[in-house]
Image (spheres, rainbow, N blue to C red):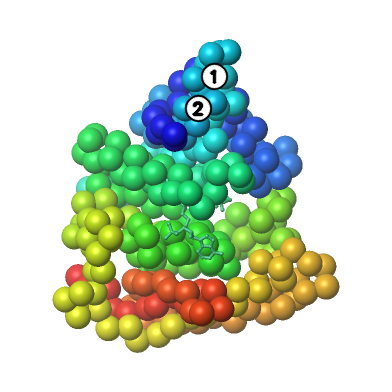
Amino acid sequence: MIRIRSCRGFGEFDTCVQLQIETWGYDYTEIIPRKTFLLAQKIGGQVIGAFDSDAEDDGISDEPDALIGFAMSLPGIRTENGVAHPYLHSHMLAVQEGYRNRGVGMLLKREQRREALARGIFHMEWTFDPLEIKNAFLNIHRLGAVVRSYRPDFYGVSSSRLQGGLPTDRLVAEWELNSLRVKTILEGRNPGESGSIAIEERIRVPAAIYQWKASDQDRNRALTVQLENRRKFQEAFSRGLAVLGFSLDAERNGIFELGKFPT
Ligand SMILES: CC(C)(COP(=O)(O)OP(=O)(O)OC[C@H]1O[C@@H](n2cnc3c(N)ncnc32)[C@H](O)[C@@H]1OP(=O)(O)O)[C@@H](O)C(=O)NCCC(=O)NCCS
């Protein structure tokens, strides 16, 4: 049984730090320390944990290691027409390897949304690697985020093992928490049922990208895809297109679906 709630106490923040290291393998230049988790929560961000309550209720103690996933976000301000609006930048989402693909990531994102809306925050953003098919599937297809911008080599060189030494290109996911699109998708319905979304372009990521990124021999193939897709995304976004859908073909290749963003 997985329970989702805000983290509390140094022990739980420490476990978030550990899970971060386990997940990304960052070196000391990139690790977010316990202090920052604590501060994020204190200044209006979020540190939400997923807890395996069976482990927690084992009668031994309220072990911090029962935390098997977390979502961390920082408060942000964006200014539109001279007016400042608060939003949340979701910086990290991690689920311990043995608990993945069981819906925990979705539960954490849903709780981020619920908690933000309860405080009157309607917008959330995060960046993700356009080569990570699973993350794109989760962000676009399951959560209903849209993407309108591309940041080449956003973080500079990264020690993340998920990056495979490639430039840290990122797409920016925009999650309009109370939009019809997001509500429809979270209810498991298709936002294009009304037929209003016309797909004008598709950008493909081969399923083999994970092996290519992880292999010294094939890393250049991953880089070629990254550079080619970077060009396609930038060109499409400059024409006013947005990523509105994401699908998987029979071979589990990922396909970004771009169309005009309904205004
Ligand atoms: C991204 C992450 C947090 C997702 O957590 P999770 O608990 O596995 O997510 P969920 O189970 O809620 O959802 C995953 C979805 O992706 C699907 N999926 C799994 N592998 C996939 C793949 N290779 N391609 C496409 N979709 C995939 C799952 O089937 C599931 O969809 P479904 O519910 O429709 O079946 C987790 O994989 C993780 O910690 N990854 C490493 C860190 C990371 O990349 N974080 C995000 C960027 S900051």
Q: Would you say the residues marked 1 and 2 are in contact, meaning their CB atoms lie under 8 Å apart?
A: yes
On the rendered structure, is 228 left or right of 116? Answer: right
Q: Give percent across and percent down for residue 78.
A: 32, 49
Q: Which residue shows up at 60% across the image and 54% down it?
A: 155
Badge 2 density bin: few <14, some 14–19, many ≥20, Cα 10 Å: few
Q: Which residue shows up at 44% across the image and 52% down it?
A: 126
For the C terminus, the image quarter is: bottom left
Quick check: 56 above or below 105?
above
Q: Nearer the viewer, residue 70 or 77?
A: 70
On the rendered structure, is 92 left or right of 216? Answer: left
Q: Give percent across and percent down for residue 12.
A: 54, 24
Q: Which mark is residue 54?
A: 2
Q: Secondary structure at mark 1?
A: loop
Q: Give percent across and percent down for residue 215.
A: 78, 67
Q: Which residue shows up at 25% across the image and 78% down it?
A: 197
Q: Across the whole image, how many numbered discs are drawn on residues? A: 2
Quick check: 171 above or below 71?
below
- The answer to whether the residue bearing label 2 lies less than 8 angstroms from the nearest atom of ligand 1 is no
Quick check: 156 above or below 239?
above
- The answer to whether the residue bearing label 1 lies less than 8 angstroms from the nearest atom of ligand 1 is no
Q: Nearer the viewer, residue 145 or 260?
A: 145
Furthest residue in direction bottom, as rendered: 200
Q: Secondary structure at mark 2?
A: helix
For the N terminus, the image quarter is: top left
Furthest residue in direction left, as rendered: 194
Query: What residue sits right under mark 1 in the picture?
Result: 58
Q: Nearer the viewer, residue 117 or 184?
A: 184
- Classify residue 243 by image quadrant: bottom left
In space, the residues marked 1 and 2 are separated at their CA atoms by 6 Å
Type of amino acid at the residue the image marks with label 2 = Asp
- Classify residue 86 by image quadrant: top left
Q: Which residue shows up at 34% across the image and 49% down it?
A: 124
